[in-house]
Image (spheres, rainbow, N blue to C red):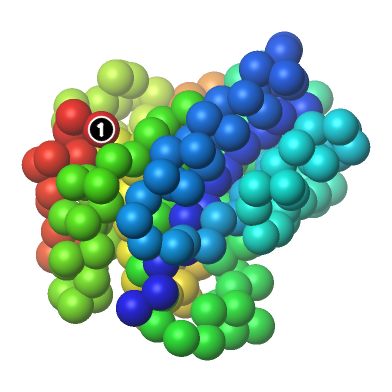
Amino acid sequence: MNTAFIIPTAISDSSVPMHATEQCLQTIKSIEALPTLCGIGIVEYSAQPILAEFQEKLLDRTSFIAAYQRDDKINALANSITPLQSTTLSHIAGLAWFFGVCAVNNIFPQKTQIIVIEPGMTIDQTIFEQITSLQHQDKYIFAPPKSSTLSKDQTGGIFLQLNTQIWSLTSDKLEDIADVLNKSVHYTYERLLEHGHADLSHTLFKFINSSDIFFLKQLEQS
C-alpha cells in the first residue's frame, strides 16, 4: 500500500511565517528519513496566500501545496471572533475541502495510507511501522482520547478530545472523513456564534464513530 503524509498549516496566519515554514520543514525532514518513500503534501488554510519565498522552500520538498480559500460565510464570522478562533475554524474547513476534493476526484487511485501530521511534529520509523502495520483494518488511527481541555459549556457537551498531532486513515475512508469534517465545520461555526469553542480534536471525537477507530497507545508519546 502507498503512504502519503498531509501537513495542514497556516503559515501566513503565523506571527512569524519563517518559523512556521521551518516547522513544516522539520516535519518533512523526519518523513524523508523514513526507509519507505512517501508522498508529502501540504494543505495551507491561512486567510492570506502563502508568500512565494516560503512556498518555494516547501515545494522543493513536497509534491503539492493545496491552498484553501475561505468562503464568504467564514470570512464574515472572522470579523467577530479572535484570530485564533478564525484559524481553528479554517483548519477544519481546509481539511474538509481537501479531503472532499480527494474523494470526488479520486486523487488516490490506489489504496493509500494517509497520515496527517501537524507542523513541528516528527515521526520515527517505529511509529511509522506501527501505523502502517494496521492498514488492513481500514480504521482511523488515533492515540487514545483524553479529557477535554475546554469546559462542556464551551464545547457544547464534548467531554473528550482526540490527539490530532498525528492521526491516520486509509483512502477508502475519504468520503467518510469529508462528511465528518463538513459536520465539524458546521458544529464549530455554531459554537463560535454562541461564544463557545470546539477545535478539530473535539469535533473528530464527536463525529467519528468510536468503533471505527483503532487507538494506538504509542501515539501518546509522539
Q: Residue at x 36, y 50 (%)?
A: 34
Residue ranking furthest to the top: 15
Left or right, residue 203 beside residue 212: right
Residue ranking furthest to the left: 217
Label 1 CA crowd tier, 10 Å (few <14, some 14–19, many 20+) = some
Name the spot of residue 119 as percent of width and height, x first.
Answer: 52, 33
Q: Residue at x 80, y 40 (%)?
A: 55
Rendered position, 206 above or below 176 = above
Please state which of residues 103 and 198 is positioned toward the viewer in this rendering: 103
Could you say whether the residue bearing mark 1 is in a helix, strand or loop?
loop
Rendered position, 192 above or below 80 = below
Find residue 198 and report its image quarter. Answer: top left
**Please, what is the three-letter code of the amino acid marked with disc 1?**
Ser
Rendered position, 29 above or below 152 = below
Q: Residue at x 86, y 32 (%)?
A: 53
Q: Which part of the image, by quadrant, shows the C terminus?
A: top left
Name the spot of residue 57 as percent of width and height, x first.
Answer: 75, 37
Whether residue 183 is visible to the viewer of this picture, yes or no, is: no
Q: Residue at x 58, y 34 (%)?
A: 24
Find residue 201 and report its image quarter. Answer: top left
